[in-house]
Amino acid sequence: MPQIAVIGNYGGWSSEHLADCVARATGKRLLVDMENVRLDLEREKVWYEGMDLTRLDAVIIKKIGPHYSPHLLDRLEILRFLENSGVRIFSRPLSIMRVLDRLGCTVTLRMAGIPMPPTAITENTEQAVKIIEEYEDAVLKPLYSSKARGMWVLQYGRDTYISVEDFKRNNPILYIQKKMNLRGMDLGIVFLGGEYVTTYARCSDAISWNTSTETGGRYVAHDPLPESIEIARKAQALFDLDFATVDVVETPDGPLVFEVTAFGGFKGMETARNMDGARCYVDYVLKRIAT
């Protein structure tokens, strides 16, 4: 049987579940936390607890760390070296790098004509205030975050300059997006190998401005508009991910894309659709490495 490792977080539900699925399929379970990996460039080896990872047949990346940060790009560089040694990696490190940084993901989407909420980027506080005045209601987003962590909602007013300066202390590049009326729901549209799998919705509790499960949102089943699936398909195809979730909001003027991620999907698929995303992913990987 092939030797397959899962890159993930110890104790994380999705990481542990994916490792369990690999174990059931191959008879071996290996969950690798990147914090404990050692790259030996002289010997061209990647070590984890005495194991030479360059001997693996494949690696599935579920999580690179517990929190989004530029540090994760360095971990992906180690995995890029591992891939160069001949190990099949799902999704490829370079593909994940392109969606990890919110700004990089956004620029790629907009250059391809993917519809998104009005968005502006600046390092200048005065310019940021002008943007927020134009938007009236805006969301300031860190470049590295998930589940709405670290995002600020600002309404234009006399304290806007001070608020922007406060946000800027930890976020020197200001990513500003017009606050959209989500009408209590946005979508996670899931693709495997570029093929549409399913859609789940995140519904808010009518108190929070966002639908994140971190702030009381819940997963429910939802059948998206055909144009939502098509736009999401085009968005994820830009990044060549093996497993991708596209965050979409359906508006009266048509669907808009917030982002493409390589790390979501499993919990929403299970809760809303009674689908085991991890098992689907493992079956996909086994077919790919057999060819």
Image: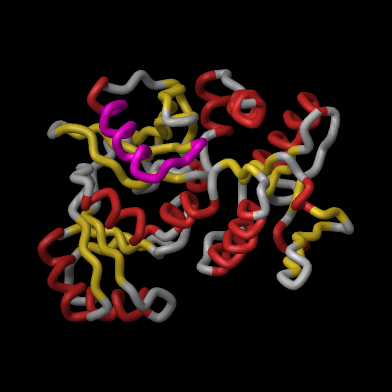
The C terminus, quarter of image:
top right
- Residue at image x 84%, y 34%? 28
Q: Position of residue 166 (x, y in %)?
A: 36, 78
- In this view, 25 is above or below 162: above
**Which image quadrant is residue 91 in?**
top right
- In this view, 204 is above or below 149: above
- In this view, 17 is above or below 291: below
Q: Is residue 229 magenta?
A: yes
- Residue at image x 78%, y 37%? 3
- Taking 38 as reference, is 152 left or right? left
The stretch of residues the image draws in magenta is 228-243
- Taking 119 as reference, is 153 left or right? right
- Taking 39 as reference, is 78 left or right? left
**Which image quadrant is residue 289 in?**
top right
The N terminus, quarter of image:
top right
Q: Main secondary structure of the magenta part?
A: helix
- Given residues 158 and 244, the one toward you in this image is 244
Q: Is residue 168 magenta?
A: no
